[in-house]
Image (cartoon, rainbow, N blue to C red):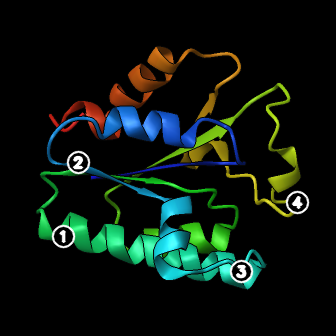
Amino acid sequence: MIIVIFGQPHSGKSTLANILTAKPNSCNIDGDLLRELFLNKDYSKEGRIINLNRASDIAHFLNNKSKSEHLIVLSLVYPYEEAREYLNSLTEDVLWVYLTHNEVRGRENFHVSDFDIPVKEKVLHLNTSELSIEECINKISNHEKISSRSIV
């Protein structure tokens, strides 16, 4: 199973991903760490899509290798529908979790201005200003794509 936690910088992606992947048989592919690994400092749309498609390829590979017995979490901004559709074209074994927040958190200058807001029917929307960390984890864990599995 792949869970993609995405949204603007400082929305809580890494916090939630680290909690979800604290159990054995799970891993978090973090956008910042992935950029360090591949030395990708290109924040243009093209550079972001290259980074996101790499993350999608890695997650898909790990998910297939583990025969869906492991939890793979992607915590990246994923601002473009094109990049999200790429992962969807690789596998249907994905839960998309879109994070938003209402307050100033200090990283607004890193926000992606041309972020494609996802369609509500396709993703689980969580506002991390209104929900606690525990409530967010519960909503993810109890989602219909996850609740029948023992991976979270």
Find residue 113 and name its label. Answer: 4
Q: Earlier in the sequence, mark 4 or mark 3?
A: 3
Q: Give x and y (percent) for residue 127.
A: 67, 27
**Which is closer to the viewer, label 4 or label 3?**
3
Q: In whole angstroms, how far apart are the C-alphas of marks 2 and 4? A: 32 Å
Q: Is residue 85 visible?
A: no
Name the amino acid type tagged 4: Ser
- How many marks can you see? 4
Quadrant of image for the C terminus: top left
Dot 2 corresponds to which residue?
A: 26
Identify which residue, 30 or 83, lies in the foreground: 30
Secondary-structure class at tag 1: helix
Asked whether disc 4 touches disc 1, contact meaning CB atoms under 8 Å apart, the reply is no
Residue located 35% across and 62% down the image: 92
Find residue 42 and name its label. Answer: 3
Q: In whole angstroms, how far apart are the C-alphas of marks 1 and 3? A: 29 Å
**Which is closer to the viewer, label 2 or label 3?**
3
Secondary-structure class at tag 4: loop
Q: Earlier in the sequence, mark 2 or mark 4?
A: 2
Asked whether disc 2 touches disc 3, contact meaning CB atoms under 8 Å apart, the reply is no
Classify 10 Å Cα crowding around label 2: few (below 14), some (14-19), many (20 and above): some
Q: In whole angstroms, how far apart are the C-alphas of marks 2 and 3? A: 28 Å
Dot 1 corresponds to which residue?
A: 64
Name the amino acid type tagged 2: Ser
**Which is closer to the viewer, label 1 or label 2?**
2
Q: Give x and y (percent) for residue 101.
A: 74, 30
Residue located 11% across and 62% down the image: 67
Name the amino acid type tagged 3: Asp
Q: In whole angstroms, how far apart are the C-alphas of marks 4 and 1? A: 34 Å
Q: Earlier in the sequence, mark 4 or mark 1?
A: 1
Q: Is residue 18 above or below residue 135?
A: below
